Amino acid sequence: MKAGTSDRVFSALEKFRMELPSWGFANTGTRFGKFIQPAAATTTEEKFSDAGQVHKLTGVCPTIALHVQWDCPEGIDSCGDLQRFADCYGVAPGSINPNLFQDQHYKHGSFGNPTPAIRERALRHTRDSIEIARRLHSRDVSLWFADGSNYPGTANIRERKRRFEEALKQAHDALSSEQRLLIEYKPFEPAFYHTDIADWGMALLLARSAGPRARVLVDTGHHYAGQNIEQIVAWLLAENMLGGFHFNDRRYADDDLTMGSIDPYQAFRIFHEIRFCEWETGQPPDIAYMVDQSHNLKGKIEAMIQTVTMAQQLFAKAALVDLERLVEAQRESDLVGAESLLQDAFATDVRPALQDWRRGKGLPSDPMQAFQQSGYLERIRKERAEKNARNVSSYA
């Protein structure tokens, strides 16, 4: 590794933090079925415990994203328990995620639903979620909608857009001055004819319409195959409208694969665009890095450790691009030279520097090995196996 490389890696790692998803530690699945894991978390407290283990081993995951319907069964009255779990397991509540897709009332949509009472129900749930976030000192309220239609002529698309504008503005008005509203998009599923927020442009327009504390959330799996996600990132950065990421990886469509398992170069290019913007503007962009994965086959904690350590590597690699030389190559239209600067940085093995950084922080140099040797997995498997076995029938 060249002289100074370790310093650049260390500097990048000091800035990097990643939020874990509570749902990533529980039994979930696809619409085709679910495979139950004996060590999966069965309660919100167990999710905090598992997230705490990942943070303890990696040192960069201080918060856990919470899903209101799954993690706050008593709504606002759950806040006391959630804070107690945070104090006990060393991870704070992170982004708060309303559930606007699972309730039977949302069969024909939530904010876009043609029935006023159902739209009001969705808005009330969103306001309650904002209040939960306020009480837990959580800044970001993250919104994803399954709203859309499956058949031509069955929905007034322009009217549904207007409903979303109205509801999102009302949700924004409920925010405190420290909070943000993150608006996510997805091109399809479960709506296959039209989805109300189908791409980054729709999310951008709705965020601007909602108010100054609304931003766009980019899920790296929510794009058509071959789409240039880093261009979307660059445009949102230019417009100061990029609020955060849900990181995963995919073979096509929307897959919950561990980050970098299919296309690590794509995530590297995304991190490069962010660093390039920060270098040019002198302003660190205010971006929340979050994981959005739920694994049926891989062990849940192991998958999270894999994702976090891969994210650290790719973030560190992006810090190795010589941006001064890159700008010069771009101005001179030196295509090979410019591309090679990215390729050379991506090809650099940053793992030794990452291990040194961990040791300097008093962390295990190999988080996965430390977890496998900790005995934690064996303990929770014994404690939770019976509960998970009882849950098999409920997932049939």
Image (cartoon, grey):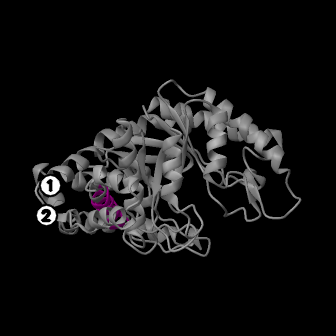
**Is 172 rendered above or below residue 278?**
above
Residue beneath label 1, please?
Answer: 6
Measured Cα–Cα span from mark 2 to mark 1: 8 Å
Q: Using the image, tell me which numbered label, if any, was put on residue 1.
A: 2
Residue 308 location, x and y as percent?
32, 59
Query: Within the magenta stretch, is there residue 287?
Result: no
What residue is rendered at 15% in x and 50% in y?
7
Q: Residue furthest top?
A: 177
Asked whether the residues under the numbered discs 2 and 1 touch, taking CB atoms below 8 Å apart as contact, a structural biologist would say yes
User: In the image shown, does 80 or 10 lie closer to the viewer?
Assistant: 10
Residue 92 visible in the picture: no
Q: Using the image, tell me which numbered label, if any, was put on residue 99.
A: none
Q: Is residue 390 left or right of residue 20?
A: right
What residue is rendered at 35% in x and 57% in y?
329
User: In the image shown, does 315 or 337 lie closer to the viewer?
Assistant: 337
Q: Secondary structure at mark 1?
A: helix
> Which corner quadrant holds the C terminus?
bottom right
Query: Within the magenta stretch, is there residue 301?
Result: yes
What residue is rendered at 61% in x and 75% in y?
32
The range drawn in magenta is 300-315
Residue 375 location, x and y as percent?
21, 66
Q: Is residue 135 left or right of residue 320?
A: right
Q: Amino acid at mark 1?
A: Ser
